[in-house]
Amino acid sequence: MTAADPQPGTRRSARTEILENRPVQLDGFVEEWPEVGMIAMESPYDPEPSIRVEDGRIVEMDGRERADFDFIDQFIADYAIDVGSAEEAMALDAAEIAHRIVDPGVARADVLALTRGLTPAKLLRVVESMNVVEIMMAMQKMRARRTPANQAHSTSARDNPVQVVADAAEAALRGFAELETTLGVVRYAPLVAIALQIGAQTGRGGVITQCALEEATELALGMRGITAYAETISVYGTEAVFTDGDDTPWSKSFLASAYASRGIKMRFTSGTGAEVQMGDADGKSMLYLEIRCVQVAKGAGVQGLQNGSISCIAVPGAVPSGIRAVAAENLVASMLDLECASGNDQSFSHSPMRRTARTMPQLLPGTDFVVSGYSGVPNYDNMFAGSNWDPEDYDDWNTIQRDLKVDGGLRHVAEKDILATRERAIRALQAVFAHLDLPEITDEEVEAGTYAHGSEELPRRDVREDLKAAQAVMDRGITGLDLVAALEKGGFRDIAENLLSVLRQRVSGDLLQTSAILDHQLQVLSAVNDANDYAGPGTGYRPSGERWEEMKKLRHVISAENPEKEVE
C-alpha cells in the first residue's frame, strides 16, 4: 500500500480512478537526493563560483586549488576558459549576466565575450537564475546558426539496408538535414551506412549522414567517405565516469582531431543525468556536471555538442525541474558558441502531453537541431531505444509548426512523391549492390520496401551473406567514390552528383564550421555565413516566403474557393 492508496473500507472517487489510469501514472518520479546527485539543479552541494589567475594561468577555480584539480578541472582551466576575460566576467553578478543574455538589446557577440570567461559553477548560477521562458528567450538569441534544422534516426530492428535506404530517402524528402543510424549487429555497419548515404542523397542532395558505433568503426567509415559526420563521442562530468570508458578529455580531443583532419564534421555527446545513472555523480547536481561536459567540448575544439540528456532523459525527467535543467544545458552549449543538437531523441514518458511539453523549450525558440534525432522508423525499429517523436507524429509535428509559425525543419509531402522517392532509393541501392557484387536486392524487396512502415513488412534477407559482404566492403577498401561510380553506372547520375558534392566538402572543410549543414543548393549554411542575428521583435529567423507557404500545407486542408475540395 502507498500513501496514494485508499485506506481499507474507504470509497475512492470516480475522478481519482480516472486520474490513476492516465498514461502519466506509468512514468517514474522520485524525490530529490542531493547527496548522491539525484537532483537536477540548485543543489546545496554544488561549488560556489570563484577564480584566481596568476601569470596568465588559472590557479584556483570554483573553490578548488590547482593542486587539487581533477583532470576535468585541469582541462577546462587550461583550454575552455578565456583567461584574459575570466576575472572581469566572474566579478559580475550571475543575475546581471543572465539579464544580458536574455536582453535582445545586448548583442550575442557581447554575451559570448562574457561567457567564455566563466567557470562551470558560474555558468550554473547564471542559468539557475532563469525560468524556463527566459531560457527559451535566451536560446532564441544565443543559438549559433540563424536557421534551425532537424535530424532523424533511420534504423532497422533487422539491420535491413533496404528498409534503411527507403526510410532515409523519405526522411530527407520531408526536410531533415542530418540522418543517423546505428546497428543491432555491428558487423552490418558498412551495408547499412551505404544504404543511409544513398537514401539521404536520393531524398534531397546535401543531407549528411552518420553511423553511430564503437569509435574505431565509426571513424573508419568516416575516413572512407561512407559517412559525413559523427556525434556519438561521449564525454562525462566526473573523472570516475570518464575513466570508466578508458577515456580522458585528451583522448577525446585526439579523436576529434582525427575527424577534423579529414574534413569530417564532428560533435561530442553528453547529457544531464549520465553520471548519477552510472553511479558516480560525486554528490553534484546533474546540470553542474553537464556544464563541465559542455566546457570539455569547448576546450577540445569540436564544433558542437549533442546534449539534452539524450539516453539519460528518464533520470532528470523523474526529478523536480528536470526538464528545465535539460533546456538549460542546451542553452549553455549555445552560450559557449557551440552547435547544439538538443536531444528530444529518447522515449521518456507515456504521456503525450509530457512528450510534447518536453520539446517546446527547443522547438519554440529554435535550436541548431531541434531533435537529434526524430525517429524516421516505428518505435520497434528504433535501435537508439526509441525516440520522443516517431513517424506516426509527422502530421502532428507539421500542424504544430503551422499553428505557431515556428520552424521545426519538416514539411508535408504528398504520398505519391514519398512512394516515388522510396522506390527510387531502393532501386539505386539495388544498382550499387549489383555493381559492387554485394548480395542481391530483389524486386520483391523493392516493392515491399516502397510501401512498408517497418521491418516486419519486409522479406527476410540472408544475414550470413550480408555479413560476409559487409566485411568484404571493409576488406576491399570500398569508399564513397566507389559509391559515386556505382550510382553513375547504374543510371542514377543525379544521386551520384549529390554524393560527390557531399564528398567535396571533405576537401573544402566548410562542414567543420560551427553548426554547418548543406542547404537545398548544396551550399553550406553555418554560424559563419548564416549567423544568428536575433535582436528582438522583427529580427532574426522567421518563416517567410516559400518556406512559410510550404509550412501551411497539411494532409487535409479545405480549399477556400471550393469547400468540397481539399488543397493538394
Image (cartoon, helix red, strand yellow):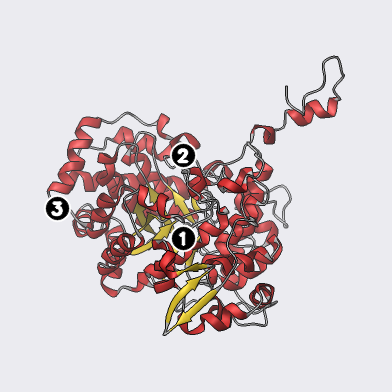
In the rendered image, residue 158, in percent from the top left (x then y), is placed at 35, 33
Amino acid beneath label 3: Gly
N-terminal-most mark, 1 or 3: 1
Amino acid beneath label 1: Cys
Q: Quadrant of the N terminus?
A: top right
Q: Depth-wise, is mark 2 or mark 1 nearer the camera?
A: 1
Q: Name the residue beneath numbered marker 1.
A: 293
Quick one: SS at disc 1?
helix
Q: Quick one: label 2, few (<14), some, or many (20+) residues within 10 Å?
A: few
Amino acid beneath label 2: Ala
Q: Do labels 2 and 1 touch, CB within 8 Å?
A: no
Which of the 4 quarters of the picture holds residue 172? bottom left
| Residue at left offset 45%, top offset 82% | 54
In the rendered image, residue 72, in percent from the top left (x then y), is placed at 42, 62
Quick one: SS at disc 2?
loop
User: Which is nearer the eye, 391 or 273?
Assistant: 273
Q: Depth-wise, is mark 1 or mark 3 nearer the camera?
A: 1
Q: Name the residue beneath numbered marker 2.
A: 385
Is residue 192 among what the camera can see?
A: yes
Is residue 519 among what the camera can see?
A: no
N-terminal-most mark, 2 or 1: 1
| Residue at left offset 18%, top offset 47% | 473
Q: Name the residue beneath numbered marker 3.
A: 477
- The residues bearing labels 2 and 1 have C-alpha atoms spaced at a distance of 23 Å
Is residue 316 found left or right of 481 in the rendered image? right
- The residues bearing labels 3 and 2 have C-alpha atoms spaced at a distance of 31 Å
User: Which is nearer the eye, 46 or 342?
Assistant: 46
| Residue at left offset 45%, top offset 60% | 177
Is residue 553 found left or right of 562 in the rendered image? left
Question: Does 13 appear above or below 175?
Answer: above
